[in-house]
Image (cartoon, rainbow, N blue to C red):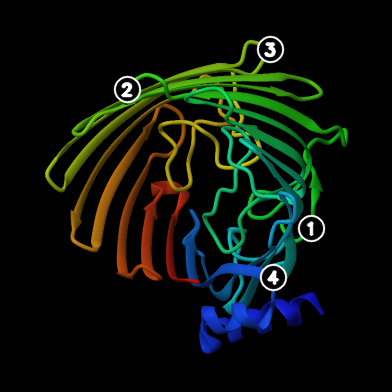
């Protein structure tokens, strides 16, 4: 029934129009996305796998009553052809699936936002990582407070997740093998011109993750520094530099690992992360990443190269075209050399 309902909503929305659909449900606002995706992977042996899938998201939110509202989001992916051996498009058995990815109580009180239930969250070691058809979402509680000038405080208690990075994408999985929740707290400070400072702490059963990042961004120059300590002598630090002239942007990033670090529960925060390869899970890894991009009005082109000290390098080619504010196209080709290659194409419609 959930699969049928989400599919019907996804089909009816563009046909009826956003305004007409909203009028049919009094006191409930909506938003969402239709996504058509194609992925083709080729492994180190030259074997290819291709998947075409149609899916997207529908989010419904009740009007607030005394600052309290309810939010629900259906995520769905439905294969039209093939099966996804990479795991970015389909479920654990290469099947389509639909899931109530978000279902939370939302409380807005002055400058404090509280969410209780299934929700999307984006922090350094727990994030949505929207790289395929269904993003990550988490089950738990979160609080965001902005009472202090130029400061955002974040607290979260998370115990399950689903989506693209979960072991079984189509269900909510324990974040830890012990079934214990992960608690995290972060502070983001933007009181210095062009500068953002952030620090985070994650309490896991067998380790504490600490993360700090400084970003400076002016009109034509940017710089970033990052450091993480994941206990047991596992640390990493990084540097990023960027510059732009008119529509051309150039970037460089560096990471050095001592021991072994994890991406956490998502795509990871590291400056050198590429479309597929990162510095995670490789002992004493070192990486440099180079990037160039150019924008022609509504068309953006980019190329990046990741040079790893251990393992295969990766070169990514990206093209994005904005048809209008609601429609966009994205094409990504990743050459992972002896690890194979991957092509992804997305056509998105926002409503």
- CA separation in Å, label 2 and label 3: 36 Å
Circle nearer the viewer, 2 or 3:
2
- Whole-number angstrom distance, CA of label 2 to CA of label 4: 41 Å
Q: Are marks 4 and 1 in contact (CB under 8 Å)?
A: no
Q: Residues within 10 Å of mark 3 (few under 14, many from 20)?
A: few
Query: Can the viewer see residue 58?
Result: no
Q: Which residue is mark 4?
A: 27
Residue 201's spot in the image, x, y percent? Answer: 65, 21
Mark 4, secondary structure of its residue: loop
Q: CA distance from mark 1 to mark 2?
A: 43 Å
Residue 1 on image: x %, y %: 82, 80
For residue 171, the mark is: 1
Dot 3 falls on a residue whose secondary structure is loop
Contact (CB < 8 A) between labels 2 and 4?
Answer: no
Q: Are marks 3 and 1 in contact (CB under 8 Å)?
A: no
Q: Which of the marked residues, 3 or 1, is nearer the chain's N terminus?
A: 1
Q: Nearer the viewer, mark 3 or mark 1?
A: 1
């Amino acid at each position: 029934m959930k699969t049928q309902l989400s599919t019907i909503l996804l089909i009816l929305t563009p046909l009826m129009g956003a305004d007409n659909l909203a009028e049919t449900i009094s006191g409930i606002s909506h938003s969402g996305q239709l996504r058509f995706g194609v992925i083709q992977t080729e492994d180190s042996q030259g074997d290819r796998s291709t998947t075409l899938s149609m899916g997207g998201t529908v989010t419904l939110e009740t009007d607030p009553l005394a600052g309290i509202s309810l939010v629900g989001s259906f995520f769905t992916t439905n294969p039209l052809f093939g099966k996804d051996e990479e795991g970015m498009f389909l479920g654990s058995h290469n099947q389509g699936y639909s899931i109530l990815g978000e279902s939370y109580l939302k409380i807005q009180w002055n400058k404090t936002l509280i969410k209780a239930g299934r929700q999307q969250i984006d922090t350094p070691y727990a994030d949505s990582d929207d790289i395929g058809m269904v993003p990550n979402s988490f089950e738990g509680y979160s609080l965001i407070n902005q009472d202090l000038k130029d400061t955002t405080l974040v607290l979260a208690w998370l115990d399950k997740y689903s989506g693209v990075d979960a072991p079984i994408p189509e269900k909510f999985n324990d974040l830890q093998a012990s079934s214990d929740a992960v608690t995290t707290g972060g502070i983001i400070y933007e009181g210095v011109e062009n500068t953002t400072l952030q620090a985070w702490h994650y309490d896991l059963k067998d380790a504490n993750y600490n993360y700090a990042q400084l970003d400076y961004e002016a009109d034509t120059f940017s710089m970033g520094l990052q450091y993480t300590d994941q206990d047991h002598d596992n640390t990493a630090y990084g540097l990023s530099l960027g510059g732009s002239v008119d529509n051309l942007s150039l970037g460089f990033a560096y990471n050095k690992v001592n021991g072994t670090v994890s991406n956490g529960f998502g795509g990871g925060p590291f400056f050198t992360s590429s479309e597929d390869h990162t510095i995670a899970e490789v002992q004493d890894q070192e990486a440099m990443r180079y990037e160039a991009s150019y924008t022609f009005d509504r068309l953006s082109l980019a190329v990046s190269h990741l040079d790893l000290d251990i393992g295969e390098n990766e070169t990514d080619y990206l093209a994005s075209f904005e048809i209008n504010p609601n429609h966009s196209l994205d094409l990504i080709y990743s050459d992972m050399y002896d690890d194979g290659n991957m092509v992804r194409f997305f056509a998105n419609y926002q409503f």
